[in-house]
């Protein structure tokens, strides 16, 4: 290979390595960037990794062929770290698809967000070790470089391990002035009023005593009271239309306090097509139902499926209001249609979770559009 091509290859390698380091660090800020950005950055990271592997393919093939027979301790350590990094990166890629809600909603293995985070910590730590050892080989001040490397590896491992238990916490406090959030223009709903039925985590979760809107992702603190998005949306509908409202409430085991664990339980329920037991909700007196639910794994939570199968919806119209973290209606509309085939199911609005406290006007406009 001529010198020019070698230089270009080397330059491309450095750019890709720096990009990967940057992307990995940005990925660790998931609580701030949100899910959509996190998933796309994940794709960018694995594309960079593929380019990195292509650029280093000859070295990699040589290393795998020699299988540690060549070189001293430093070489073996570098090769060992590289191999471990490669395996951790593959495991991270699989776990990314497993917990993805936007790009790979159909992949379901363990559903453990914590496993994904520990793997990310492993990849970060091994990347620092891999990059640091590569620099160490070329460095003239070996002793100083070695100390820096040990400190960086220890820091990335400690940071990752210490942060994992806190990663599903929202570091922003979502405080809502209840009256202001819920009150708005009143609508004259002539004729028989609809029934609003909602499902939300609050009321269906065994929260740890210290959970508040900071620690419980997707929860709101409305005038100091813990509230689910679905309940706030239902109160907005109630304020606009003055209709009856019912909550879907579990009678059996509630969801775990941790957001990550709830995500895993919900995935298991979806995979098994479970029907968790709920308090009965009588819909027989109503012709129209406004159904408010959060998107769970791209579809309705299984307690909502229980509700839809437990009543007779023949001839009724169901209007959907979904709250979500990026999925729109996902596959929920089709799922609801399949669960109550006798009903007319109409997509209403799907509100992004962060926009819920300010959604009163949007809800009002939507209800206006379906006024009898
Ligand atoms: C178990 C679980 C699964 C979720 N799955 C999705 C999803 O697939 N797509 C999405 O956009 N948001 C998803 N979310 C986010 C919720 O839909 C969103 O935070 C919603 O506003 C929560 O409403 P709630 O406070 O009424 O429970 C999920 C949340 C939980 C707890």
Image (cartoon, rainbow, N blue to C red):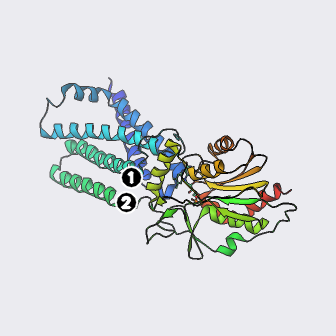
Number of residues whose C-alpha sits closer than 10 Å to that of mark 2, classed few (under 14), some (14–19) or many (20 or more): some
Q: Secondary structure at mark 1?
A: helix
Q: Name the spot of residue 218 as percent of width and height, x first.
A: 54, 61
Res. 258 image quadrant: bottom left
How far from the left and from the top, in percent, is residue 43?
47, 40
Q: For this rendering, which residue is in front, 356 or 371? A: 371
Give me the residue at 48% from left, 52% from top.
Answer: 263
- Residue at numbered disc 2: 165
Percent position of residue 274, x then y? 52, 46
The residue at 56%/68% (across/down) is: 174
Quadrant where the C terminus sits is bottom right
Relative height, residue 252 to residue 184 (above, below): above
Going from the N terminus, do you reach mark 2 or mark 1 first? 1
Q: Are marks 2 and 1 in contact (CB under 8 Å)?
A: yes
Indicate left or right for 20 with 142 as reference.
right
> SS at mark 2?
helix
For label 1, the crowd category at 10 Å Cα-Cα, with few meaning under 14, some 14 to 19 and many 20 or more, is some
Residue 257 to residue 5: above or below = below
Tag count: 2
């Amino acid at each position: 290979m001529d010198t020019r091509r070698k230089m270009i290859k080397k330059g491309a390698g450095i750019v890709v390595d720096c990009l990967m380091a940057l992307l990995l660090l940005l990925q660790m800020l998931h609580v701030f960037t949100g899910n959509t950005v996190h998933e796309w950055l994940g794709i960018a990271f694995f594309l960079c990794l593929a380019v990195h592997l292509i650029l280093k393919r000859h070295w990699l093939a040589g290393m795998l062929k020699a299988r540690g027979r060549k070189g001293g301790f430093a070489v073996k350590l570098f090769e060992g770290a590289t191999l471990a990094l490669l395996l951790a990166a593959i495991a991270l890629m699989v776990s990314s698809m497993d917990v993805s809600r936007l790009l790979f909603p159909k992949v379901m293995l363990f559903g453990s967000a914590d496993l994904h985070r520990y793997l990310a910590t492993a990849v970060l730590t091994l990347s620092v070790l891999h990059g640091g050892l590569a620099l160490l080989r070329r460095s003239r001040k070996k002793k100083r470089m070695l100390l820096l490397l040990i400190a960086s590896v220890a820091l990335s491992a400690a940071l990752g391990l210490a942060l994992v238990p806190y990663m599903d916490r929202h570091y922003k406090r979502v405080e809502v002035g209840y009256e202001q959030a819920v009150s708005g223009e009143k609508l004259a709903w002539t004729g028989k009023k609809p029934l609003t039925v909602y499902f939300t985590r609050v009321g269906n979760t065994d929260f740890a005593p210290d959970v508040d809107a900071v620690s419980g992702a997707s929860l709101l603190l409305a005038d100091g009271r813990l509230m689910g998005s679905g309940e706030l949306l239902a109160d907005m509908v109630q304020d606009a239309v003055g209709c009856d409202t019912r909550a879907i409430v579990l009678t059996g085991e509630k969801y775990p306090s941790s957001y990550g664990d709830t995500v895993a339980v919900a995935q298991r329920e979806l995979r098994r097509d479970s029907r968790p037991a709920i308090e009965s909700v009588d819909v027989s007196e109503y012709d129209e139902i406004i159904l408010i639910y959060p998107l769970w794994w791209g579809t309705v939570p299984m307690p909502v499926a229980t509700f839809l199968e437990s009543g007779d919806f023949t001839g009724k119209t169901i209007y959907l209001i979904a709250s979500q973290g990026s999925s729109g209606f996902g596959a929920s509309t089709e799922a609801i249609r399949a669960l109550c085939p006798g009903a007319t199911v109409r997509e209403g609005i799907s509100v992004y979770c962060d926009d819920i406290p300010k959604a009163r006007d949007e809800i009002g406009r939507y209800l206006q559009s379906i006024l009898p």
